[in-house]
Amino acid sequence: MSQNSRGVSDELTGRPGLVWWYWLPVVAYAGLIFFLSSLSNPEVYTPSFLYEVGDKSLHAFEYGVLGILCYRAFRHAAGAWAARYALLLAITASVGYALTDEVHQAFIPLREADAWDLVADSVGASVAAFGWRSTVEL
């Protein structure tokens, strides 16, 4: 990708639809995570079969999706520099959001911050983003 004089990828200049196509799912999904984290009893709104999988697996899956969405957005809709470092940026953004999510949960009645949830979130985001890059983005 080449860049114009402002350092913006030529592929993104004049194509705001492309930016929205990749970043809107990130924002919407992050909003969903925030909403679910703000519930005192999220299990009431979640299908029971999901809890048979295990809490940490759900955390890894949840942030795996976020990791993939962030990778796609950085890779295709954030400019040439971000595209080059998309994997690192996606993992950093996802883990950063997971950290703020755990802090947020500390203030919700009947919820608590859990360092092991953060570990599961981080592993899920990292493995999924790396897997996406390695298999889909050949």
Image: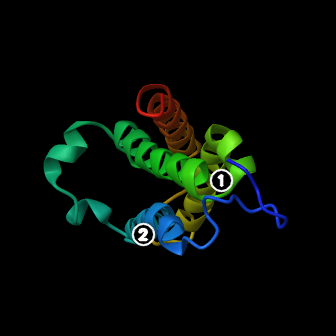
Q: Against 112, is 28 above or below? A: below
Which residue is more in the foreground, 26 or 106? 26
Kindly identify the residue that appears in the image at 47 percent across and 72 percent down: 17
For residue 3, side relative to residue 91 (left or right): right
Q: Identify residue for label 2.
A: 28
Report the Cα–Cα distance between label 1 and label 2. 17 Å
The label on residue 124 is none
Specify the amino acid type for callout 2. Answer: Ala
Tell me if residue 134 can be seen: yes
Which residue is more in the foreground, 12 or 87? 12
Provide residue 131's location: percent of width, then percent of height.
46, 29
For residue 25, side relative to residue 46 (left or right): right
Q: Identify residue for label 1.
A: 96
**Disc 2 element:** helix
Kindly identify the residue that appears in the image at 31 percent across and 66 percent down: 41
Tell me if residue 111 can be seen: no
Provide residue 20's location: percent of width, then percent of height.
48, 70
Kindly identify the residue that appears in the image at 55 percent across and 52 percent down: 76
**Disc 1 element:** helix
Which badge, 1 or 2, comes first in the chain's sequence? Answer: 2
- For disc 2, the neighbor class at 10 Å (few under 14, some 14 to 19, many from 20) is few
